[in-house]
Amino acid sequence: MFSFFKKKKKEEPKVEEVQVVEEVQEELVTNSTPDKEENTPSKDETTEEVVENIQKEEEPSKEEAIVEEIIEEKIEPEVIEEVAQEVVEEKIEEPKEEKKGFFSRALEKTFASIKTVVPQKKEKIAFDDIEEMLIEADMEYEIIEKAMDGLPEEITRKQLRHRLVMLFEHAPDVDLNNLPKPFVRLIIGVNGAGKTTTIAKLANKSKKEGKSVILGAGDTFRAAAIEQLATWADKLDVPIIKTKQGHDSSAVAYDTISSAVSKNIDNVIIDTAGRLQTQTNLNNELKKIVKVCGKAQENAPHQKLMILDGTQGNTAIAQARAFNEMVGIDGIIVTKLDGTAKGGALFSISNQLELPIFFVGIGEKQDDLIEFSPDAFVDSLLDEIYTEEK
């Protein structure tokens, strides 16, 4: 972005435009008389018309408009560099601020809960108040003790932020560069966690990134699940492989991956039946699906994602732990975060399971899925209780 501004400054056409404007202004001053003052267009109006005619072939972009304004006002080169640098910094901050905005919207109920403990923003907050606040947000007490160990009686934002962000450091870093093609995701979770809607959101995200995607309706246990996913596929205009209720779900997984390979599709997302960790038959079926995916494509599924209902808080951890032992979970997606005051459970989920949280669902719409950022999440919480750092 910065080099763009410097190039614009050196481009001759922009200088010529300013020269033409100045010549017109001089001519207008020379030819103007008091008698014709009322009928003669003002210097500013004529200047605008000339500039408009010069630039009529191409509507300037936002960045070009900034450069033109700088040139017309004859600002020094050093100022141009300062403006360019400010724009670059703003562009860098946008994604982080956007995520903070999403979390602020999603965590409204959690904020309301913690504000019963800390109603006013402060520069320092008492140890006991922080502890009670984290309990209200549904963080497990064992995790609270780990986060608070050794902190002083009066805690600053910087001290608490460091401890809370550290709770996510146990989750391994996942390299999503140089992904295999097709990249196969298997979606796992209990009934009612929001699997089908999350699959639609993931498909929508892939399309927005310019990737092709195919869905596999592997939840053959419920006819409604097949119909619901087919409706989403139609709405998003993506292909889907499906069968009738009661048919072999592992066959659906195999056919979906095979279709993706033959059609050179980038991403595969396969649904599975909602199940509890205690349902032996369904869990054996899940193990079979994983094996069949590996036969359709080497090392597939590449990601086994567990969908956890955010309204369940810490009770979801037992479910995730059981499925992780069963088939090996690669990451977590937390849904319905906007409908719960238990946002603090995300600390426990990541820390205890030592699994990354990839995404967070914050609504029912297809765009209501954001990549999880520990920094943005923690900052959103602390913004509600601490004054701005000086």
Image: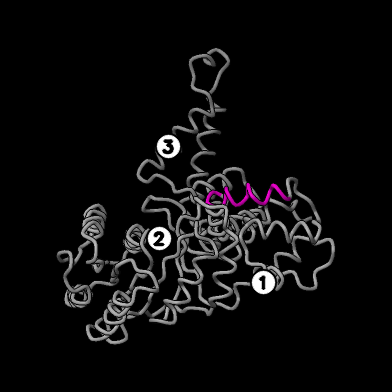
- Kindly tell me whether residue 370 is visible in this rendering: no
- Mark 1, secondary structure of its residue: helix
Where does label 3 land, which residue?
52
Q: Nearer the viewer, residue 54 or 321?
A: 321
Q: CA distance from mark 1 to mark 2?
A: 26 Å
> Residue 159, can we see it?
yes
Residue at the (27%, 78%) spot, across then down: 285
| Numbered disc 3: secondary structure | helix
Residue identifier under label 1: 142
- In-image side of 171 versus 134 (left or right): left
Q: Is 360 in the magenta?
A: no
Spatial CA span between label 1 and label 3:
67 Å
Quadrant containing the C terminus in the rendered view: bottom right
Helix, strand or loop under label 2: loop
What residue range appears in magenta? 105-117
Q: Amino acid at mark 3?
A: Glu
Q: Which comes sooner in the sequence, label 1 or label 3?
A: 3
What color scheme is it?
A: one colour
Mark 3 burial class by Cα count in 10 Å: few <14, some 14-19, many 20+: few
Q: Which residue is labeled 2 in the image?
A: 193
- Depth check: give the residue in front, 231 or 265: 231
Q: Main secondary structure of the magenta part?
A: helix
Q: Is residue 107 magenta?
A: yes
Q: How many marks?
A: 3
Which residue shows up at 17% across the image and 75% down it? Answer: 255
